[in-house]
Image (tube, coloured by chain):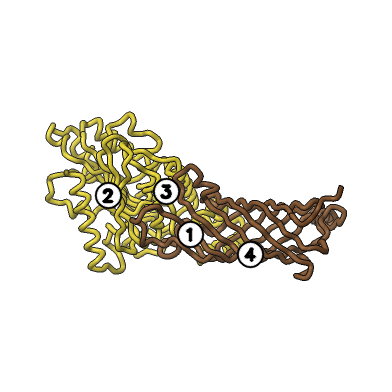
Chain colours: A yellow, B brown
Amino acid sequence: MKLFLRLSALFLSVWACAPEPSITKEMLDSGTLFDPSLYNPANYLVSKALPTPTPEQAKKPVIIACHGYSATTFEWDEFRSWSAGRTDFLLSQVLLGGHGRSYNDFKASSWHDWQEAIMTEYSQLEKAGYQNISLLTSSTSGALVLELIASGYFVNHIKPRHVLLVDPIVIPSDKSLSLIGLFGPMLGYIETKQSIEEDKVYYHFRPQETLQQLQNLLTTVRKDLEKGITLPIGCDLKVYKSKKDPAADPVSAVLIYQGTQTADGKPVSVELINSDLHVYTRLKHRESITAQDQLNQTSTFSDIRQRVTH
Amino acid sequence: MKIFTGCTYVLAVLLSSSVYGQQQPDSPTLDIGVRLQKSISLYAENGLMVQYAHPKLASNRLYLGLAYVSSRLGSAFHSNAIKQDSYLFSASYYYRPKWLIHPVLKANIGYFAAHYGSPIFEELPKTSLLLAPEVGLCYCPTIPLKIHTSIGYHLINGNGRSGPGTLYPVFLQTSITWNVLKRLKK
């Protein structure tokens, strides 16, 4: 409501002159800091680290972890740290298109570009011979993967074994996003309140063009869910959703539950998490974290591992 | 500027013509019809409405009404969209009664209930008080027909921490009603 009033005030005051953001060199937006996966892809992508797997490696479960809107591979770094020393699965951290680079790169990207990076890693792993691939997503990448399934991408590809969605967004918590098509061109961008450390791994400024892309993606996925999405054969899906979430409304889990079924007609799994964080599996650089937050994180990481390796 | 002033004058003359508009009758009005509603970027929700005005109540310009709209009759009809129902009590005030098109201000108060279909979601908010002002125009020709279109704003909506998530702020509505107490002249 507050944001809506602010948007309305800006609508009147800056009718036709969208301002430019004040980007500093300490921000990811500046184009001086980049996601580390761009420098060292082999440290993040299994397709680059192990392009010719042995038959034994090719059978090992591979998790493709995808981050959310305006984020970077950082969002799954804690899962990588937690997985360190475990040899029963491989982790591939994908950087979505337009992300982790600069404000202008982000501004010029569409949701199809964001999604392209997921398809590229998936097909590279498939070509390399990996046979047991699962998708792990946070926030917007959940919508991107649901759209991939709905659009039939996996019909002509190896089927993913598990789709695991952490705080997926279909319905935004901030409902003013629904009006971005009207107010966005006048605003130019929206500034995010986040710490200096978060500024290095999340874009500080959100170009209105990308917010319109996000809204378009969410509308597409919502309509796909209304028609019904059937998972590929042999694939299951689980939603992990914070009960209170300032970015992805928890009702998103309801829409996914009602709109998705397995290939044999069974409902998908949903676990509501006792948390008020968005992407509760990322705790680093949070202002404050509780023992419950840490418990939520480790129990979800354990559940993901257990599902993928059994 | 002159063109704008000229257009405004012509429009005002047209709208104020009592030849085309419904005169406010000396008898009560009971409008019955349908309400078609669409939240911006979310569901279509349709239903029924009834409203009543009386000559002794602000000279037939204040309408008190009841409405029921549901996604069951809109986006959720034969789809997986969430089934949600809104029950509304409204007070509308019709300005410029001699004009063909009446500016209308409307205040709605009501109750919203969404149905999530599984006990998994028992803890999520699914009901809410509705408070929604509307502003719009009503086309009221001499026959007992009214076509009223307006834009409304839900003062209470879901924000991820409280309130049902599918209660969106801005909506457009069109209602088409018939005054069942007025007889057409032969």
Q: CA distance from mark 4 to mark 1?
A: 18 Å
Q: Amino acid at mark 4?
A: Ser
Residue B90, numbered circle: 4
Inspect the image, locate mark 1, and give the three-letter code of the amino acid beneath it.
Ala
- Disc marking residue A106: 3
Front position in the image: A233 or B31: B31
Q: Circles 3 and 2: CB distance less than 8 Å?
A: no
Residue located 77% across and 54% down the image? B140
- For mark 3, does the 10 Å Cα neighbourhood hold few (<14), some (14 to 19), or many (20 or more) residues? many
- Image side of residue B4 versus residue A65, left or right: right
- Distance between the alpha carbons at the discs numbered 4 and 3: 46 Å
Using the image, tell me which numbered label, if any, was put on residue A190: none
Q: Are marks 4 and 2 in contact (CB under 8 Å)?
A: no
Give the image quarter of residue A7.
Answer: bottom right
Left or right: residue B167 versus residue A201 is right
What amino acid is found at the position of numbered circle 3 in the picture? Phe
For marks 3 and 2 on the same chain, the one whose residue lies earlier in the sequence:
2
- What chain letter is assigned to the residue under label 3? A
The secondary structure type at the circle numbered 2 is helix
Which amino acid type is marked by label 2?
Answer: Pro
Q: Which residue is mark 1?
A: B113
Residue picked out by circle 2: A36
Nearer to us of marks 1 and 3 is 1
Q: Nearer the viewer, residue A205 or A229?
A: A229
